[in-house]
Image: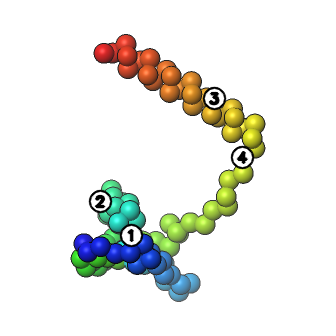
């Protein structure tokens, strides 16, 4: 794959009301890796329908294209979750030290 600028590493999703599938054209290596993984795991749903040395085109049901609202987390909830993760990480370190 030749070196593309960040601007050229685009992803285009195309679908319409008349058809049930969406077509995803991408030159972004990260998106290609994710979609290739989905093609391998769910070949009946995700399909690679074309590729060149710099891009790939995929087909999937348009219901898998998603729009999401940004999450709003209060400062208190964020602080509580941070403390939870610190505890989980400390327990993981302690349990791996016991194994060694």
Question: Front-most of 81 and 13?
Answer: 81
Tag 2 residue: 40
* Label 2 vs label 3, nearer the camera: 3
Q: Can residue 45 be seen in this view?
A: no
- Check contact, mark 2 vs mark 3: CB within 8 A: no
Question: Which of marks 2 and 4 precedes in the sequence?
Answer: 2
Q: Where is residue 100 in the image (x, y as percent from the top left)?
A: 30, 15
Determine crowd level at label 4: few under 14, some 14-19, many 20+ residues with C-alpha closer than 10 A.
few
Question: Callout 3 environment at 10 Å: few (<14), some (14 to 19), or many (20+)?
Answer: few
Q: In this image, 84 relative to 72: left or right?
A: left
How far is the residue under mark 3 from the one under mark 1?
35 Å
Number of callouts: 4
Q: Is residue 98 above or below residue 83?
A: above
Tell me the SS state at disc 1: loop
Query: Viewer-nearest of labels 2 and 1?
Result: 1
Q: How far apart are marks 2 and 1 (CA)?
A: 18 Å
Using residue 53 as the reference point, say whether residue 66 is left or right of it. Answer: right
Q: Earlier in the sequence, mark 2 or mark 3?
A: 2
Could you say which disc has been placed on residue 73 in the image? 4
Q: In this view, does 4 lie to the left or right of 80?
A: left
Q: Where is residue 19 in the image (x, y as percent from the top left)?
A: 49, 83
Q: Which of marks 3 and 4 is nearer the N terminus?
A: 4
Name the residue tied to disc 1: 28
User: Label 1 neighbourhood size at 10 Å, few (<14), some (14-19), many (20+)?
Assistant: some
How packed is label 2: few (under 14 Cα within 10 Å), some, or many (20 or more)?
few
Mark 3 to mark 4 CA distance (whole Å): 15 Å
Asked if marks 3 and 1 touch (Cβ < 8 Å), the reply is no
Q: Residue visible at 37% across and 16% down? A: 97
From this viewpoint, is residue 33 visible?
A: yes
Horizontal and vertical percent position of residue 82: 62, 34
Labelled pair 2, 1 in contact (Cβ < 8 Å): no
């Amino acid at each position: 794959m030749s070196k593309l600028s960040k601007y050229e590493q685009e992803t285009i999703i195309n679908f319409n009301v008349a058809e049930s599938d969406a077509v995803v054209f991408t030159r972004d290596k990260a998106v290609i890796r994710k979609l290739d993984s989905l093609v391998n795991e769910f070949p009946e749903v995700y399909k690679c329908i074309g590729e060149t040395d710099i891009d790939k085109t995929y087909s999937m049901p348009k219901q898998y294209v998603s729009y999401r609202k940004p999450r709003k987390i209060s400062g208190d909830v964020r602080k509580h979750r941070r403390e939870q993760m610190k505890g989980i990480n400390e327990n993981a370190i302690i349990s791996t030290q016991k194994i060694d």
